Amino acid sequence: MIQALAILIVGVILTQVAVIATSIYLHRTLAHRSLRLHPVADVVFRTILWLTTGLRRQHWVAVHRKHHAFSDREGDPHSPRRLGFWRVQLFNVYYYVRECRNAQTIATFAPDLREDRLDRAVFSHGGLGLAIGVTLLCALIGLWPGLLASLIHTILYVVLLAPLINALGHFRGGQNFDNTAYNWRIFAWLTGGESLHNNHHAFPRSPKFSVRGTELDPAWLIIRVLAATRMVAIVGSRMAPADRVRPCRTDGATV
């Protein structure tokens, strides 16, 4: 029982590390240019994502920018309004991979992220990164515990949390602003603030996703610490005009 709980905790920690790295590096730093990282922090975040997700930064950024350009319209890679909630929730990885294979999407929406030497030598080999990550984990905590923790992390990150941001975030929830996205305050605790999706679509270049005292953006707390150590510079405006904030409708906390 104790070992099973320990394995679960390791899997959850891995997922949270990947979620926070995705939010700070891929999303806020690269996709929307609201942060600027110190070169050391840049390599650290890229390494974390390489070992825990295998994601290529050019692909993630291009797909996300295209989502903003065509939000819930024809061309949106993963809109639940067009595809249905369960198709996005269960098959989000399929829609992501399909869009990544579209060379025009990468060229159009991520022309500023050309592969550098580190990409070509290391970070473009996502499968290798995942294999090394799992191997390191097994070396640290044992073969079967490492494999089980990796499986838990995969389920939580790939099957549950990442799709949930897209599926539920454009399906229903609370709103502070008039757009097609929704906030889920309760899930924001688990998604690094990403489930404050309505706020983000209202101010996509804001490095902070929360606008109310009752909203928590965990990634923002880490950004503040990194900024204090000069590992991160905040370059995007985080001011939300007060006259555009209105009472929320049904929020995730009530579900």
Image: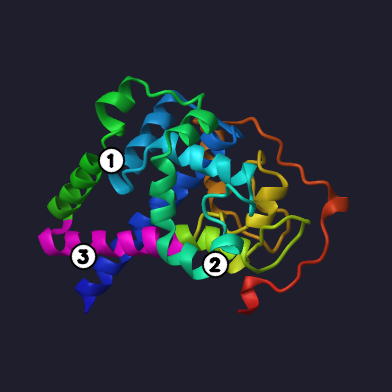
Disc number placed over residue 221 in the picture, else none: none
Tell us which disc is closer to us: 2 or 3.
2
Tell us which disc is closer to us: 1 or 3.
1
Say whether disc 1 or disc 3 marks the residue closer to the N-terminus. 1
Tell us which disc is closer to us: 2 or 1.
2
Q: Secondary structure at mark 1?
A: helix
Disc number placed over residue 148 in the picture, else none: 3
Q: Main secondary structure of the magenta part?
A: helix
In the image, residue 151 lies in the stretch drawn in magenta: yes
How far across and how far down the image is residue 26, in percent? 48, 40
Residue nearer the viewer, 131 or 62: 62
Say whether disc 2 or disc 1 marks the residue closer to the N-terminus. 2
Residue matched to label 1: 126
Query: Would you call the spot at circle 1 few (<14 residues within 10 Å), some (14-19), or many (20 or more)?
Result: some
Which portion, as a residue range, is magenta? 141-161
Q: Quadrant of the N terminus?
A: bottom left
Separation of disc 2 and disc 3 at Cα?
A: 31 Å
Q: Quadrant of the C terminus?
A: bottom right
How far across and how far down the image is residue 241, in percent? 83, 46
Whether residue 58 is situated above or below residue 202 in the rendered picture: above
Tag 3: amino acid: Leu
Q: Secondary structure at mark 2?
A: loop
Residue matched to label 2: 84
How far across and how far down the image is residue 250, in percent? 71, 74
> Farthest residue in the top direction?
117
Tag 2: amino acid: Gly
Residue nearer the viewer, 20 or 128: 128
Tag 1: amino acid: Gly
Mark 1 and mark 3 residues within 8 Å of each other at the beta carbon: no
